Image (cartoon, rainbow, N blue to C red):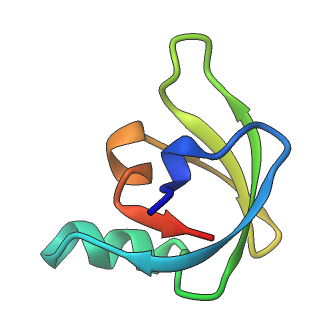
Amino acid sequence: MKTLKDAKIGETVTVARVCGEGAVKRRIMDMGITKGTAVYIRKVAPLGDPIEITVRGYELSLRKADAQMIEVD
């Protein structure tokens, strides 16, 4: 399945599932990234880390490691 890390700049994707467990999963969900949420990929840093996204009306930066735990459609 495609992850948030694989999404292209300017693309809007829908969260299908948040993988991982424990504190990492809770932190991602606390940022508003939950199943069914639309996520817009704004930009990616020159070296690919972090990824800047827009979710629920606010801007957020995610590390590639965290973005890889988020499966999208």
Q: What percent of the width, then of the height, locates residue 57? A: 83, 70
Please name whichever residue, 30 or 69, is drawn nearer the observer in this view of the structure: 69
Residue that sits furthest to the left in the current view: 22
> Image point 52% across, 83% down: which residue?
34
- Quadrant of residue 29 in the image? bottom left
Q: Position of residue 61 (x, y in %)?
A: 57, 45
- Residue 66 location, x and y as percent? 36, 52
| Residue at image coords 58%, 75% | 15
Classify 55 as above or below 15.
Answer: above
The quarter of the displayed image where residue 63 is located: top left
Q: Is residue 37 left or right of residue 42?
A: left
Q: Is residue 69 above or below residue 8?
A: below
Percent x, y of residue 64: 41, 38
| Residue in front for this viewpoint, 55 or 16 | 16
Q: Residue placed farthest to the top in the image? A: 46
- The quadrant of the rendering that contains the N terminus is bottom left
Q: What residue appears at the point 54 percent right and 43 percent down from the top-left corner?
A: 6
Above-or-below relation of 28 to 53 = below
Instruction: For the C terminus, give its image quadrant.
Output: bottom right
Residue 24 placement, left or right of 62: left
Q: Nearer the viewer, residue 56 or 17?
A: 17
Is 39 on the left or on the right of 34, as rendered? Answer: right
Hey, which residue is sitting farthest front in the picture?
1
For image coordinates 75% across by 75% down, the residue present is 56
